[in-house]
Image (cartoon, rainbow, N blue to C red):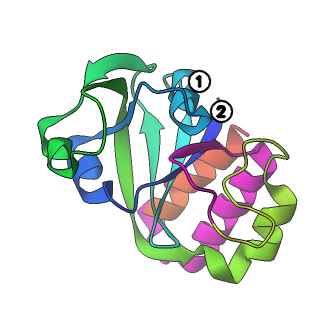
């Protein structure tokens, strides 16, 4: 099981409703990172500096045309990469600003989601280390009173 961190400021609602991640099949590393996602991987979803969802990949990455609901953006080519996901919306979102010093210490050294000044790196999908994932899951458990959500996160932690 691998962990990833995705920035979805433009597309979160549409991708979440469709149950997928999609990126153009371009040469940028943050798009090509999609090829690394396999069934069972965990993805942390960031929207406006908050972690708003966690998903589990239902499929390995595969080539797919741009979903029609993303065509509105008119920003990308039609050919792309897709991963189907089960999204779990968080009842209590987690503001990354308040935990940034920890995230900077725990994130991977290469292809990290955040730069040294604590801003999100420009891009879509990034690696998330197991220690960063564990920290985020524990922070989400502490911030949420929903028993079902807590139990779900605890199961994920047991597999780390």
SS under mark 2: loop
Q: Which residue is drawn at the image coordinates 64% and 29% (left, top)?
A: 1
Q: Which residues are magenta?
A: 120-148
- Quick one: SS at disc 1? helix
- Residue 43 vertical placement versus 11 (above, below): above
Q: What residue does disc 2 label? A: 2
Taking depth in this image into account, of 97 and 152 the one nearest to the observer is 97
Spatial CA distance of label 2 from label 1 is 9 Å
Magenta stretch holds residue 131: yes
Instruction: Tell me where residue 92 appears, x and y as whole percent.
Output: 45, 76
Q: Residue at x 76, y 44 (%)?
A: 130
Quadrant in the picture for residue 33: top right
The residue positioned 85% from the left and 46% from the top of the image is: 109
* 112 vs 103, nearest the viewer: 112
Q: Position of residue 64 (x, y in %)?
A: 28, 20
Cβ atoms under marks 2 and 1 closer than 8 Å: yes
Mark 2 or mark 1: which is in front?
Answer: 1
Instruction: Report which residue position mark 1 lands on.
Output: 36
């Amino acid at each position: 099981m691998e962990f990833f961190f995705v920035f979805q400021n433009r597309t979160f609602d549409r991708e979440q409703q469709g149950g997928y991640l999609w990126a153009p099949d371009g040469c940028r590393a943050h798009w090509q990172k999609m090829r690394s996602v396999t069934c069972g991987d965990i993805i942390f979803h960031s929207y406006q500096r908050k972690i708003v969802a966690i998903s589990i990949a239902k499929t390995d990455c595969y080539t797919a045309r741009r979903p029609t609901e993303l065509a509105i953006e008119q920003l990308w080519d039609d050919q792309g990469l897709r991963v189907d996901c089960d999204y779990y919306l968080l009842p209590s979102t987690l503001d990354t600003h308040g935990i940034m010093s920890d995230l900077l210490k725990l994130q991977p050294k290469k292809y990290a989601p955040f730069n040294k000044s604590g801003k999100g790196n420009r891009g879509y999908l990034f690696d998330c280390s197991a220690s960063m994932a564990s920290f985020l899951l524990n922070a989400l458990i502490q911030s949420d009173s929903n028993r079902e959500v807590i139990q779900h996160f605890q199961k994920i932690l047991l597999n780390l």
